[in-house]
Image: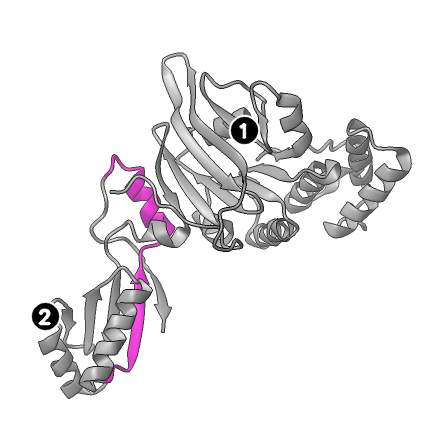
């Protein structure tokens, strides 16, 4: 299995973007337990990077090292062009960090939390009030601004936490499991906020336990297992690493079905459903080849469905002692 798959950002063009975050051989151990075993990262500016891994895989440790909260045992890294070891102040000035546990002070109001953060960033009183008002409106917290933060719902607290992170205008944001514990509606609201941030040119480094979240948001995804990057690439590239993808052709005309089944000898037959299952990685090249073949033979299929493994399959395959499932569970379907 390839250890790494290269890709370009969804929002980028044909030229590589400058790195907002890069790491080379990053290592960290606690006693005799190696948490990070020489990981390499290259995250283009203005993109979303998702780091996946089982609990205890080292995701939060990576965030803490890159945000200068703890030191690495080996390797080197640059964030916003600053070396994390020799220029930590430069790194801290360029980033924002939001963890899975809110930093909001529940004893004061949402507005007071924001103004306190503005003071910590040494903004003038007028500038702090302006930024606070803008962010409270942006995060739909104006009506709750004068209420104690302890009265906020989980989704509201998470929005306030992220708003506080943005007071200093960071260009790189580390989001460590930002939607843990949120209900589906609040999670989707947070996803839209993250998309809006990236549209403004912010780079997002996301750790998450929700594979759907990475699939929805990330330009690039890395799977961390046993302290190493097991695979890296776009969601679609990672899915193609796992066997089990196929194209399903369904027919209503028994004659057309028999003709296709006779010619496509590699296909698995379902005579009752008049359907054929053809192994495929779901790539555009393979689909075009199949469609060209159908056109050339005059055989008409009534339905063509592409089945590809999802990120659940990728995650379990890469984090289960290297065992790749021969038949991924619940593949996604795309009707063409």
Point out residue 270 in the picture as x, y percentages from the top left corner.
Answer: 16, 72
Q: Residue at x 42, y 17 (%)?
A: 29
Give the answer, above or below, for where 269 lies relative to 47.
below
Q: Quadrant of the N terminus?
A: top left
Q: In the picture, residue 145 is in which quadrant?
A: top right
Under tag 1, what secondary structure? strand
For mark 2, does the 10 Å Cα neighbourhood hold few (<14), some (14 to 19), or many (20 or more) residues? few
Which is closer to the viewer, label 1 or label 2? Answer: 1
Under tag 2, what secondary structure? loop
Point out residue 251 in the picture as x, y percentages from the top left corner.
Answer: 23, 81
Q: What residue would you read off at disc 1? A: 78
- Residue farthest to the front, as pictured: 15
Give the answer, above or below, for where 77 lies relative to 287.
above
Q: Is residue 264 left or right of residue 286?
A: left
Point out residue 291 in the picture as x, y percentages from the top left corner.
Answer: 27, 76
- Residue farthest to the top, as pictured: 31
Q: Residue at x 70, y 33 (%)?
A: 104
State which tag comes first along the sequence, 1 or 2.
1
Residue range corresponding to the magenta coloring? 300-322
Q: What residue would you read off at disc 2? A: 265
Residue 15 shows in the view? yes
Q: Residue at x 14, y 76 (%)?
A: 271
């Amino acid at each position: 299995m390839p250890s790494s798959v290269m890709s370009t950002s969804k929002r980028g063009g044909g030229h590589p973007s400058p790195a907002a975050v890069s790491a080379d051989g990053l290592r960290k151990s606690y006693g005799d337990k190696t948490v990070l075993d020489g990981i390499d990262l290259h995250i283009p500016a203005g993109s979303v990077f998702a780091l996946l891994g089982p609990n205890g895989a080292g995701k939060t440790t990576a965030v803490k090292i890159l945000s200068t909260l703890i030191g690495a045992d080996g390797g080197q890294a640059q964030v916003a062009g600053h070396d994390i070891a020799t220029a930590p102040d430069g790194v801290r000035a360029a980033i924002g960090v939001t963890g899975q546990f809110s930093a909001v002070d529940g004893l004061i109001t949402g507005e007071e939390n924001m103004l306190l953060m503005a003071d910590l960033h040494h903004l003038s009183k007028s500038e702090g009030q302006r930024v606070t008002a803008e962010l409270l409106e942006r995060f739909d917290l104006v009506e709750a601004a004068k209420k104690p933060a302890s009265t906020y719902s989980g989704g509201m607290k998470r929005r306030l936490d992220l708003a506080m992170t943005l007071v200093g205008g960071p260009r790189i944001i580390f989001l460590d499991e930002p939607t843990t514990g949120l209900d589906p509606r609040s999670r989707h609201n947070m996803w839209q906020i993250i998309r809006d941030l990236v549209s403004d040119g912010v780079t997002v480094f996301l750790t998450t336990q929700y594979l759907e979240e990475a699939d929805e948001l990330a330009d690039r995804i890395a799977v961390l297992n046993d302290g190493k990057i097991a695979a890296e690439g776009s969601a679609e590239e990672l899915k193609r690493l796992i066997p089990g993808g196929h194209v399903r052709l369904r027919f209503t005309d028994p004659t057309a079905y028999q003709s296709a089944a006779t010619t496509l000898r590699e296909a698995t037959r379902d005579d009752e459903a008049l359907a054929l299952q053809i192994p495929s990685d779901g790539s555009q090249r393979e689909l075009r080849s199949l469609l060209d073949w159908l056109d050339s033979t005059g055989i008409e299929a009534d339905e063509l469905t592409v089945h590809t493994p999802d990120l659940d399959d990728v995650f379990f395959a890469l984090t289960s002692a290297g065992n790749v499932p021969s038949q991924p569970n619940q593949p996604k379907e795309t009707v063409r």
